[in-house]
Image: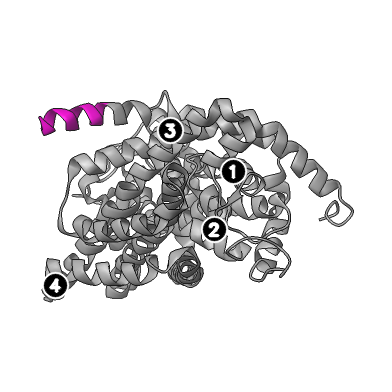
């Protein structure tokens, strides 16, 4: 019975994440919003970084829970994860170097999507009786579209709540445990699986049970530090191998519209595969349009929704344009992606092999540390997402029980591999996007006007 249900969920998952539903829908919405915003996410990128820098602090008269910077870091905690390391390797193995170009395209148009999501999240957020600032798709659907659309908001909250336990919890803790145990095995150290699970439970509990402010504080330190170390390590490899970098870019651009011929252990790819896996992995990485990130941005202490929208659009830029590009270039420069014996099953180790080719054992340690800490930060970010969905569905008193249950699920993921749970989580993660995208399209005139008014203000128009 379970096998039959798993097959059924797998089939639905393939349809939702296939080339005819979410992938074209997410891109079309991103392009529409980019045009409607007159490409503000591209034109105002320097202003967005300046806003992020100023957002480390907040005005005492402004309302919210987290500084704009910490709200952004909490959002990035949920997006910068395994997709930036393993997902990029999978895209290249299945779609060739050209897949990286299509990852960039998802980020370029996804910036407009994230701008709108974060802006609407702040615009239509609510305050619970105990002082929590809650927002996201369920709230901008209910408050922006009206009572007749509450069913759509409820659907999103249900999808988000289910997805939080899988894609944002157990799959991540499983990746943490698997990589720690593998790393220990490489050096003759035997990590007890149960001990790893208990340590994860304790560490997660210390942070998660402290609520969104403690999660924001930890994410505000962990995410930028780990991302910076990973990026610096990747840049160091590229500087040492600078002569191969132009060829890596040539491979990306030349095969983006033609596919790539078979070479070494690489089986080759068509244009369709380059687009499909580039777009799919890009969307999996930056989650533009999925509706998760605006839940974190809704907690920001700001006086104007557009200010947080500017930070929201940095999500795909930092996640995909920066971190994923570093991973991709290191893989291409190393040549490991077409080495004999490399297969899709080896996607998880391809990035580690590519880093270790240039940096020796330290490279392998760096990637493993990246996977472990990025996965742990994803657990933190998704706890906020799931908690807000629970509050919407059951009221503000559901926050603490949810965090307790979410924390207890962490060691379950570390100890077991429940394929049905993984597939259900992936399916519900995809289903989250549908109500969110409907809301973004219907509320787009609101965002366009807010953005126009913001930059028409003499204080902002020349920025």
Secondary structure under badge 3? Answer: helix
* Residue found at the very far right of the displayed protein: 458
Depth check, mark 2 against mark 3: the one in front is 2
Residue located beneath label 2 in the image: 132
Q: What stretch is highlighted in magenta?
A: 1-11
Residue located beneath label 1 in the image: 117
Depth check, mark 4 against mark 2: the one in front is 2
Query: Distance of mark 3 from mark 1, alpha carbons?
Result: 17 Å
* Residue found at the very far top of the displayed protein: 20
Among the two numbered marks 3 and 1 on one chain, the one whose residue lies closer to the N terminus: 1
Residue located beneath label 3 in the image: 155
Residue at 17 percent across and 46 percent down: it is: 418
Q: How many marks?
A: 4
Residue located beneath label 4 in the image: 191
Query: Distance of mark 3 from mark 4, alpha carbons?
Result: 41 Å
Query: Distance of mark 2 from mark 1, alpha carbons?
Result: 19 Å
In screen coordinates, is 28 left or right of 447? left
> Is residue 9 located in the magenta-colored stretch of the structure?
yes
Query: Distance of mark 2 from mark 3, alpha carbons?
Result: 22 Å
Query: Distance of mark 1 from mark 4, alpha carbons?
Result: 42 Å
In screen coordinates, is 268 left or right of 457? left
Among the two numbered marks 4 and 2 on one chain, the one whose residue lies closer to the N terminus: 2
Q: Which of 460 and 321 is in front in this view?
A: 460
Q: Nearer the viewer, residue 434 or 371?
A: 434
Q: Where is residue 310 in the image (x, y as percent from the top left)?
A: 67, 52
Depth check, mark 3 against mark 1: the one in front is 3
Q: Quadrant of residue 400?
A: bottom left
Crowd rating for badge 1 (residues with CA inside 10 Å; few <14, some 14–19, many 20+):
many
Crowd rating for badge 3 (residues with CA inside 10 Å; few <14, some 14–19, many 20+):
some
């Amino acid at each position: 019975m379970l096998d039959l249900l798993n097959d059924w969920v797998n089939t639905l998952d393939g349809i939702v994440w296939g080339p005819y539903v979410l992938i074209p829908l997410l891109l079309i919405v991103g392009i529409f919003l980019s045009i409607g915003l007159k490409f503000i996410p591209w034109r105002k990128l320097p202003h967005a970084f300046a806003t992020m820098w100023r957002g480390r602090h907040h005005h005492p008269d402004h309302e919210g829970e987290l500084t704009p910077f910490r709200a952004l870091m909490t959002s990035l905690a949920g997006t910068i994860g395994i997709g930036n390391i393993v997902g990029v390797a999978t895209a290249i193995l299945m779609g060739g170097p050209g897949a990286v170009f299509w990852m960039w395209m998802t980020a370029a148009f996804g910036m407009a999507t994230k701008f709108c999501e974060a802006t609407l999240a702040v615009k239509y957020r609510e305050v619970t009786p105990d002082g929590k600032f809650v927002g996201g798709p369920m709230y901008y659907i209910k408050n922006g579209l009206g009572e007749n659309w509450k069913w759509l908001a409820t659907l999103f909250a249900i999808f988000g709540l289910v997805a939080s336990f899988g894609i944002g919890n157990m799959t991540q803790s499983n990746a943490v445990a698997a990589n720690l145990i593998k790393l220990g095995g490489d050096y003759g150290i035997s990590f007890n699986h149960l001990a790893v699970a208990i340590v994860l439970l304790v560490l997660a509990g210390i942070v998660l049970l402290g609520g969104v402010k403690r999660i924001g504080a930890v994410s505000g330190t962990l995410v930028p530090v780990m991302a910076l170390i990973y990026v610096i390590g990747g840049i160091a490899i590229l500087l040492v191998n600078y002569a191969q970098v132009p060829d890596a870019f040539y491979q990306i651009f030349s095969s983006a519209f033609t596919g790539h011929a078979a070479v070494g252990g690489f089986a080759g790819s068509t244009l369709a595969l380059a687009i499909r896996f580039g777009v799919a992995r890009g969307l999996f990485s930056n989650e533009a349009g999925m509706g998760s990130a605006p839940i974190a941005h809704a907690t920001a202490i700001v006086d104007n929704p557009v200010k947080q929208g500017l930070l929201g659009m940095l999500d795909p830029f930092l996640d995909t344009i920066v971190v994923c590009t570093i991973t991709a270039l290191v893989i291409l420069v190393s040549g490991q992606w077409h080495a004999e014996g490399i297969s899709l099953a080896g996607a998880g180790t391809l990035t580690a092999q590519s880093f270790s080719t240039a940096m020796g054992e330290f490279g392998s340690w760096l990637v493993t540390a990246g996977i472990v800490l990025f996965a742990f930060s994803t657990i933190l970010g998704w706890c906020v997402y799931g908690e807000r969905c629970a509050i919407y569905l059951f009221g503000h008193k559901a926050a603490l029980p949810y965090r307790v249950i979410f924390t207890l699920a962490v060691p379950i993921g570390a100890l077991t591999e429940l394929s049905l749970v993984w597939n259900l989580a992936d399916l519900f993660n995809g289903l989250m996007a549908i109500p969110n995208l409907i809301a973004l399209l219907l509320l787009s005139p609101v965002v366009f006007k807010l953005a126009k008014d913001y930059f028409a203000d003499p204080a902002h128009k020349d920025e």
